[in-house]
Image (cartoon, helix red, strand yellow):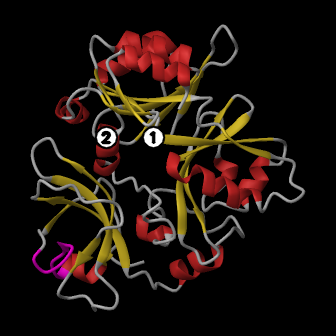
Amino acid sequence: MNAQWTAFLQQASAACSDGQIAQFGVAEPGLRAALSGGLCCDLSQLGLIRLQGPDSDSFLQGQLTCDVRQLRAEHSLLGAYCSPKGRALACLRLFRHGDAIYLALPRELVETTLTRLRRYVLRSRTTLDDASDELVGIGVAGADSAQVLAARLGALPETVNGVTHSAAPDGSGITTLRLPGPVPRFALYGTAADLAVIWTALAPICVAADDTPWRLLDILAGLPSVYAATADAFVPQMLNLDVLDGISFQKGCYTGQEVVARTHYLGKLKRRMYRARLDSSHTPQPGDALFSAQADASQGAGRIVDAVAHPEGGQVLLAVALVHCAEQGTLQLGNAEGPVLHLEALPYAVEATA
């Protein structure tokens, strides 16, 4: 983690553990602020891979599910990096900052993803580096927070996936991405010094938090995450990336493309990602198994994608599950004695079958 940023957050009453921000006091205010607005989150749990060089775009075009030709200075992309078997090894947010492309993903996946990508560079004129400790990321949510940001940075992205860039005296600047959510939501990337100024300006109207409320907003928005426990577990369509513009079926070949395309065109998709509430004080972990009496015991009914405690009680989660079990049966956590998942509507339309 960026040492300068860590020192700043510790002065702002953040608790650190193993070089990572553990929490800002108790979690409850941050989770409630995620629903009402007025939230400022440290995003140090996300890592960054930086690509530089004239062939960076074409290299990524042959590796990721999204159409990298649509990545522009003012537009970010969601996509996946797959194994040759078409399973998502990472779910990525792509954006441009300066003269480089950055891939944002859970920090725990940066090293393995970087290692695999480097195997395919060959003669491409691009360099790939771990930039997790170079740029700092914060998440800001809430209408009042947006007004403060606009006063400091100028124009903000008006549409989801939009990007704006503000200049700084040292030439680095801050890149601001607009993300989906129940309240206006922005991810900011820049130097520790620049973002410390923004954090301080937001302090009077925002609840400071770690990334947990940010994950809550991702779940409410139906945005999937892939962690070490779920890497190589899901075809990208199972994570609803086909309806989130995270997959292009016209772009041509990329790693895992044959399986992803066959799943799309032959209509063999039997699992989808759902949002659900769970009446339990225990927060499930990514990869935890689901049970359904309607599922074949050898298959399993599904797995947890991500879960966070909901400020109004219980847990809210995303899970990949067999369509017929989710829509015609009952899903439970773990086994037949586990708590029942109560499905909720996603903020976008998903067909029951591909």
Q: Would you say residue 162 sits in the magenta stretch? A: no
Looking at the image, the residue that sits furthest to the front is 18
Residue 5 spot, x, y in % from top left = 50, 21
Q: Is mark 2 on a helix, strand or loop?
A: helix
Q: Is residue 336 magenta?
A: yes
Q: Judge from the rendering whether residue 70 lies leftward or rightward of residue 17; answer left or right.
A: right
Residue drawn at 45 percent across, 16 percent down: 8
Residue segment shown in magenta? 328-337
Q: Name the amino acid type tagged 1.
A: Gln
Q: Where is residue 155 in the image (x, y as percent from the top left)?
A: 50, 19
Image-based side of 331 in relation to 100, left or right: left
Res 45 label:
1
**In front: 218, or 77?**
218
Question: Dot 2 corresponds to which residue?
Answer: 212
Q: How many marks?
A: 2
Tag 1 near tag 2, CB within 8 Å: no
Of callouts 1 and 2, the N-terminal one: 1
